[in-house]
Image (cartoon, rainbow, N blue to C red):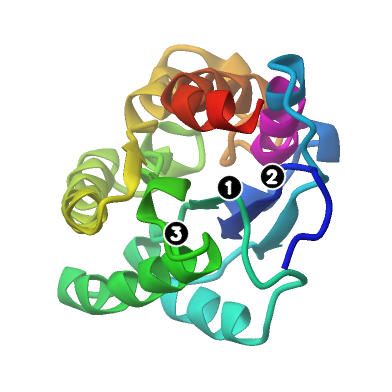
């Protein structure tokens, strides 16, 4: 349980959450904290449970290992790209995503309004993705995002669709990290702009 007056934040996910191939301060969880502090919120350093390559099931198992606090003021969840990359059936994701979403809600003090789910970016527009089938990747990402959006909204969690931002990388290489696959710090900054707009009510409550 949080015994300080600082706003607490837990980020759950995979490579997009840990910011593969960018500096720590460019990760979107850290950029979000900076933006929240700019809004006058005394926010603690975010706790991050994420690893490059994790599927939804692997994230579920990792979170089951425990977190540093019993509950958080904000939990942000982004997971599923590796399910798509590995060719898992959407039906499997539809079974597993509600489990990690329920855990996220529990960790947000049982209040779904304190949970934000991010859509999965489209990696098919990257130079790495071009070696596969960008059209197929886009269609599969859209299918998985339709699932996580429907389930998130049904549960009462907020949902932020950052997939259109990710698709700008098709024409703007500055949005792609040096590994030609993951987002750059600039793309994460655009995510944070959209997140801050969504979190305005939460931030007002934290002031």
| Marker disc for residue 79 | 3
Under circle 1, the secondary element is helix
- What is the C-alpha distance between the residues marked 3 and 1? 9 Å
Above or below, comparing residue 119 to residue 170 in the picture = below
User: Is there a contact, CB below 8 Å, between mark 2 and mark 1?
Assistant: yes
Quarter of the view holding residue 163:
top left
Q: Which residues are magenta?
A: 26-35
Q: Earlier in the sequence, mark 3 or mark 1?
A: 1
Q: Around disc 2, counting alpha carbons within 10 Å, would you say few (fewer than 14), some (14 to 19), or many (20 or more)?
A: many
Residue located beneath label 1 in the image: 16
Residue 144 point in image, percent of width and height: 23, 56
Q: Is residue 17 left or right of residue 20?
A: left
Tell me where residue 64 appears, x and y as whole percent: 58, 85
Query: For this view, does 5 lie left or right of residue 99?
Result: right
Per the rendering, the mark at residue 19 is 2
Q: Measure the alpha-carbon separation of dots 2 and 1.
A: 5 Å
User: What residue lies at 82% left-to-right and 45% top-to-bottom?
Assistant: 45
Q: Which mark is residue 73?
A: none
Number of labelled discs? 3
Q: Is residue 168 above or below residue 27?
A: above
Q: Is residue 31 magenta?
A: yes
* Residue depicted at 61% across the width and 80% down the height: 62
Q: Position of residue 152 (x, y in %)?
A: 26, 54
Answer whether residue 128 is magenta in the image.
Answer: no
């Amino acid at each position: 349980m949080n015994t300080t007056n600082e706003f607490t934040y837990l980020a759950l996910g995979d490579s997009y959450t840990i910011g593969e191939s960018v500096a720590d301060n460019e990760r979107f969880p850290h950029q979000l904290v900076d933006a929240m502090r700019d809004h006058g919120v005394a926010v603690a350093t975010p706790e991050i449970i994420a690893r490059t390559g994790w599927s939804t099931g692997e994230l579920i198992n990792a979170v089951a290992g425990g977190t540093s606090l019993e509950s958080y003021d904000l939990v942000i969840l982004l997971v599923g790209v590796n399910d798509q990359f590995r060719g898992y059936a959407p039906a499997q994701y539809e079974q597993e995503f509600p489990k990690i979403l329920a855990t996220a809600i529990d960790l947000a003090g049982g209040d779904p309004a304190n949970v934000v789910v991010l859509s999965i970016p489209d990696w098919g527009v990257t130079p790495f993705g071009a070696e596969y089938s960008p059209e197929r990747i886009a269609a599969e990402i859209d299918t998985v995002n339709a699932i996580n959006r429907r389930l998130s909204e049904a549960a009462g969690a907020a949902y932020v669709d950052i997939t259109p931002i990710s698709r700008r990388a098709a024409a703007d290489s500055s949005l792609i990290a040096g590994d030609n696959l993951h987002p750059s710090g600039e793309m994460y900054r655009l995510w944070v702009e959209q997140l801050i707009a969504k979190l305005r009510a939460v931030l007002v409550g934290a002031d």
